[in-house]
Structures are given as structure tokens and as C-alpha cells.
Amino acid sequence: MVSSLFASDGPLARNISKFSPRKQQTQMAEAVAKAIEQQQCLLVEAGTGTGKTFGYLVPLLKSGKKVVISTGSKALQEQLFLRDLPAITKALEISEPTALLKGRSNYLCLERLGRFAMQGEFQTREQAAEITRVKRWSQHSKDGDVSGIPELRENSDILPFITSTNDNCLGRECSHYESCYLVKARRKAMEAQLVVINHHLFFADISVKDTGFGELLPDAGVYLFDEAHQLPEIATQYFGKALSSRQVFELCKEITIAYRTEAQDSKQLGKAATHLENATRDMRLAFGRDNNRGEWFELLASGSLQGPITRWHDAFNLCYELLKLQLGRGEVLDRCFERVVEFRTLLDQLDGQRQPGYCCWYESHGQNFSLNITPLSIAERFSQEIEKENVSWIFTSATLTVDERFDLFTREMGIETYQQLILGSPFDYQNQSLMLLPRYLPPANQYGRGKLLVKQMLPLFETVRGGIFFLCTSHQLMQEVAGVLRDTCSRNVLLQGEESKQRLLKQFTEDGKAILVATASFWEGVDVQGEALSCVVIDKLPFSSPDDPLMKARVDDCRMAGGDPFAELQLPKAVIALKQGAGRLIRDGSDTGVLVLCDPRLVSRNYGQLFLKSLPPMPRTRERSKAQDFFHSLDKATREFEHE
């Protein structure tokens, strides 16, 4: 029985420091073991503190079957492989090999590095210095993971030129194929009993299989998805199509390199690449200076893109005709021709008619833009995967249910037959936390709301001994809140976007009393334990923007099918998002803190009860003074403890 491994006198307790048996963890392990044995589909919602990673890793390792574990983030992927798996395999004396496999953009491409370095035309001295560091590092790197390159910026401009994509990888035709880091990583994955990947790689594998060009991952007997609530949105990226300015700019550079190395007698090819690059920049200007996101065919019908998109078409056609004349002269030329054909085909689709079941939308930000064809549902396609025979499918997250039902998730993923398990958190929320629903809040859409919220929160912030998360539902409000806080508060105010996520979290934790103002990317996957995070403020209920083109299309699709889009789609998605944000507060059995929800609709609308019911069982108050008393009592308890 797998439960014996979790006993107080079992191998985990004997060999892993700080391990202690948890009822919920053992229940999860037993359910996972049963799903593996009976080849079932299992859904598990495991509250924060359950210890779900051990709860599924132990039965997976003991099963002896080929296993693929997919996570929603690189952070969890690396935690599983570098920390949790070694601890468990050592404790249980398991010798079967395990492997970590990331997407191809995480691995250095030796062929592209050599080509880029040989070209020697760097836009800045910093790029030249970075290439020198990469070349030096590549001489002794064992895994080629670019995250290990010292002092290389996370968003470095050179990354696209030293890593590969499906479009520009030369495959077996590459002279570095046998020494390729990605190929080596895949071989290890094929040989391992358990492989740790992420959701993006899983769906990239499916999309590659759909094209008939092979596969990235080994077939397995068990697939487990942690942070499974992210699956529906990530899947749409891979079951749809996209054309971005970044892709086109990269193609232009590839054509230029091909001209200089494989077709030096065709000067027109180099000019065509420059022409396509300029036409792409004109397209970006046509979207306007502001960041925009909207329905593609509505923008097309307005006529504002007529000139730029015609010139873009002409530039693609010129590259197509010139590259066609060069076919067979070199591998890079041939690959560029294939990409031009792919991009022209997608552009033709975007010039055609609306496709039932799909949303065509655009997004522009900074110097870039993207055009997207996204399926409104991936249920039918994903259901084909889970119908495979002799395979177990396990999905787990702290936020899979709404009103203790898995309906939204199963509907979006096309899952019809499944076993389910809901495990509450072992944390003592009644004594560890407090939920404040303040009175006299400004309406959710009131102008200057950020300033009014800060004014209300400042007296509370003065009593918070540790750090504070101020989570916002829009970038505009985030900027407003941060600006007011910096003018009125003595604490260090950190703002999302001013540094990388990892650097901001490091500064926040080390400061111990900072206020971090952020939006969506800090609502989940962030684990700050202890006093460093003592208060989480959420500005309003996280309903999707009514202007979001994909949500608008799904709402229309649901309505046409006779459904209620608010009850079936918008409301449950907002509940899941709020659960994620609220989950940032209590991360450990000794954590304490206050959750502040600043949306009057929680008490003024009937659906507010659904949100409150889905949150951890915290004591609630509407009086700010009681939240202040909560922090005063913590200070008193701390002083008494220190005095003793």
C-alpha cells in the first residue's frame, strides 16, 4: 500500500528532514495510485499546504510505468526535478532514471550561435559582449540550458539568434545534430522512467504530431498535469495559429544571412529582406502608438490598414518569388522559403472570411504586434488525447473547482468520464488569517479609484508588520496605485515591469516590509512565506475585460448555443482567478495575514456568495479596525515570545 510510505515511521519520514504525515497528502497518493492501476482519469483539487507534489510523485515513481509530469511554470518544473525528485528517489531507494525536458527555446543552438558570431554584425557593444560570454560558456556547458549563461539578461536581444524554433531548426541536416543539446535532452527523456516537462512543451508536441513531422515527447502510460487550471488557455495557443512581427523580423535576418552565405550573387534577395522588414514596421505604426488588442476583422473593415497590409503582402510576395529561384542552393535558403510560404498562407487566411469556431484577433504593444487565429474551444481536440487506451490521466491544482464542481474544467478540456477528489487545506485559517471586506468602497468602475483605495488602505498598512501585495486587475490601476503609494507611503514600493519577476520577488522578500504592486503575473505561481508577505489586497473581482476579443467571441458562441455566458463562462473563470490571488497569502502552517477584497459586489450582488464560498474559510469582517487589531495582536504575541 502506498499509504505506508507516508506513515510516521515510513521511509519518507525516516529519510527526509521536516517531513511529517498529512492526511490529505496520503489521501491524494492513494487516489493517484488507484488511477494508475485502473487506468482512470482523475481530477484532484488540493488546497494550499496539502503537499501535493509528494502526494503524486511517490505513487508515480512506485508505479514502474513510463510517466510524463507537466507543470504550468518553469519554477515548479525545476523544483520538482532538482529538489523533490532527488529527495524521494533517495528516500525510497529508487534507481530508475528521471529527466528534465524544456522547450527548444531554452537550449543553446550551436549552429545558430556559430552563424551569428561569424556574421559579426552586432547592433550594440553589449550584444558583442554577450556573444563572447555565450561562446565561452558553451565550451564547458553540459546541458546547454541558456538560463545558466552567467550575466545574460532574461530578455536579451541575442536569445532568438542563439536558440532555435520549429521554423528555423535544420534537424538531421544540421552539422551539429549529434552534439545538439536539445537532441541529447530528448534522448535522455526517451530513456527515463519519469520525465518532467511544462504545459507549453506538451501542447507543442501535440501540434507537431498533428503536422506529421514527428514528436518531441515519448509515449507514456501516465500523464500528470500540475497547475492544471492553466491548461485550457495554454492549449489554445498551440491549437491556433499566429503571425507576429517578431517572427517576421527574425525571418528577415535569416534571409539576410542566407543571402550573404549561400546566395551572394543575388543582391535583390538582401534588398527584399530589408523591404519586408520596413513593411512590417509600417504595419506596426498602422496599429497606433498605444497598446491595443481587438477583433481583427473589425479593424480590417475600418480600412485603416488597407495601404500597409497591401505593402506587406507585396513584400512577402517578392521574398517568395526570389527565394523560389534559389531553392536547392542551401539549407538556410530552403528553410526561409518554407517559412515565407507558411506566413503567406496564414496572411491569406486573415484576408478571407471568418472561420466558425475561431476568433481572429490582433494585439500590438511596444514595437511589436501579432495576428492570431485562435479556437474558441479545444475540448474536441484534447478529448482525442485522453481517449488513448491503457493510459492514466491525472489533473491537479489548488484551483480546479467552482462551488466544489469541476464543470468548467471538464467542459473546456473535453473530459467526460473521470474520478474526482477535493482536498481542503490543512492550514488553520480561523487563527492564521482574516478576510476584510471594507465598507464605503468606490464603485468598481469609478475614475480615480486607485487613489481612493490607497487612501482607505493607508491606516491599515501602518499596522502591517511585514510586506504587502497590492494585486490589481488592470495595468492602468496598477500604475495609479503605485504612484499614489510612492507619494504617500514611507515603505519601499515595487512595481511590476520595472524589474524581472524574479528580481522583484527577491527585493520584496529581502526588504521584509515592501509593497509590491502588480497585475496578473503575480496572482499565481508566487510563493512568499513568512512575515515578508503579511497582507494581500485585491482591487476588484477579476472578471475578464469586456473588450477582450477572445472572451467576446466565446461569449457570443455560448449565447448562440443557447447558454448563459455569464453563469457558464465569465463568472466561473473569475472565481478561479480570485482563488489564485487569495492563495498568495497563507503559504505555510506558521504564516499569518489579512486578505483585503476591495469589491463591493461581493456583498451587494447575489453572485458574491459564490466567490466567498470558494475562498479558504477565513473569519470575515467589514471593519478595518478589526484588521488593525489582528495585526496588533500578532505584534503583541511576537513581543511576548521574544521576551520569554
Image (cartoon, rainbow, N blue to C red):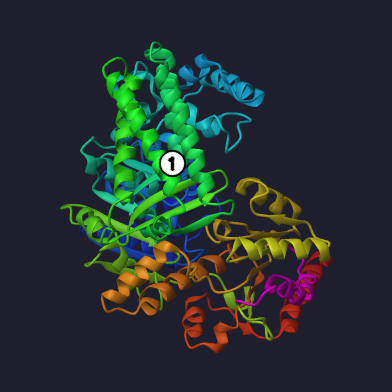
Q: x and y percent of residue 300 in the render?
A: 40, 55
Q: x and y percent of residue 399 in the render?
A: 44, 66
SS for callout 1: helix
Q: Nearer the viewer, residue 96 or 360?
A: 360
Image quadrant in which you'd find residue 257: top left
Q: How many marks?
A: 1
Asked whether residue 473 is drawn in magenta, I would say no
Q: Which quarter of the figure is the C terminus placed in? A: bottom right
Residue linked to disc 1? 90
Q: x and y percent of residue 26 in the render?
A: 39, 63
Q: Residue furthest left?
A: 389
* Residue stretch rendered in magenta on the structure: 445-467
Residue 57 shows in this picture: yes
Q: Nearer the viewer, residue 251 or 318?
A: 318
Q: Is residue 629 left or right of residue 179?
A: right
Asked whether residue 447 is drawn in magenta, I would say yes
Q: Reply above or below: 43 against 191.
A: below
Residue 88 shows in this picture: no
